[in-house]
Amino acid sequence: MKKSFVVLTLSLLLFTSCKGNSTNSSSSSSSSSSSINNSADTILFLNQFKEELLAFDGNVSKRTYQTVQTNDYSGLDMEIKETGDYTLYQDNFLINQFSQTINDSTNVSGRRERGIADSSRLYQITYYGNQDGDNSVTYYVNNEANLTAMFNLGFVSEYISQILDTTIYYYEMQEQENLRLSLTTNYREISFPTNGTVTLQYRFIYYANTSMTKLEEVQRDDTLTIENGMIVSSSTTMLYALQDAINYQYMTSEATYIYDTIQAFDGTKLNPSDFPVRE
């Protein structure tokens, strides 16, 4: 039980049921924005917003974070807290040192290593200590999308991958799968400052075809601090709910982003072939 959960950090994909194999000035915006449901218009709109966000993308070398998540499964709650940092090294190698607390009682610490296994596979090792029975490795297809998702530590890349691209996928599938979707954001009202803060507001609902049952729902707010055109910190709250919130995950997270030169790794890497494979 101590290591059987996965904290819903900002590196995980959402919306699992449909999709298969981010002088001082301040910018704020209202949550009362229009709902967009036409698939072609929505895809165009989201792609345009992606281009705005990409202006704030950068080569983040380190990210520190703290996350608190409550998982509720049919009324049974579990609270998981995780703190840690990610450090990116040259040649697509990354180390995540972390510490977790479950329900304020069980404490776990460990590290995750990500790298390139070969020309066709990427890997992530989860390591809790020598001979620990929960040590494992997971493999991923070595392609451009996964390289970006696994080795880019900035807010923008994660937000595009998790939120924008996933939403675009839903709307691409809307007509052929007859999906009933609702999207409400404040993206049209946002003006990104060179120095200051801005909040992204996102509300998405995937309804059942024959009722108003919410099969999936995401409510997410991200407040970004921008300095000299770079996102230096983010504060996130997110609710991810299934089946009219019979099951849900509620997460709050704080992260800081550091833009130092990416160094070569001079330590000893874990060998993925030494660990059992976890799908």
Image: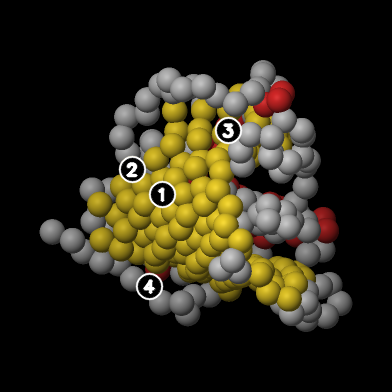
Per the model, the C-alpha gap separating discs 3 and 4 is 37 Å
- Give the mark nearest the N terminus, 1 or 2: 1
Q: CA distance from mark 2 to mark 3?
A: 19 Å
Provide the secondary structure element on which disc 1 rests.
strand
Image mark for residue 64? 1
Q: Which residue is mark 3?
A: 114
Q: Amino acid at mark 1?
A: Thr
Q: CA distance from mark 1 to mark 2?
A: 9 Å
- Specify which label sits upstream in the sequence, 2 or 3: 3
Within 10 angstroms of label 1, few (less than 14), some, or many (20 or more) residues?
A: some
User: Which residue occupies 86% across, 77% down?
Assistant: 210
Question: Which of the two labelled residues, at mark 3 and mark 4, occupies the earlier sequence position?
Answer: 4
Q: Is residue 198 visible?
A: yes
The amino acid type found where label 3 is placed reads Arg
Q: Residues within 10 Å of mark 4 (few under 14, many from 20)?
A: some
Q: Earlier in the sequence, mark 4 or mark 1?
A: 4
Q: Quadrant of the C terminus?
A: top right
Residue wearing tag 2:
258
Residue for point 61% across, 57% down: 7
- Spatial separation of the CA atoms under disc 2 and disc 4: 27 Å
Extreme residue in the right direction: 210
Amino acid on which disc 4 is placed: Ser
Give SS at disc 2: strand
| Residue indicated by mark 4 | 29
Vertical relation: 9 (above or below) 112: below
Q: For the residues labelled 1 and 2, say whether their Cβ atoms are less than 8 Å apart.
A: yes
Residue 105 in the image, given as x and y percentages of width and height: 59, 66
Amino acid on which the number 2 mark rests in the picture: Ile
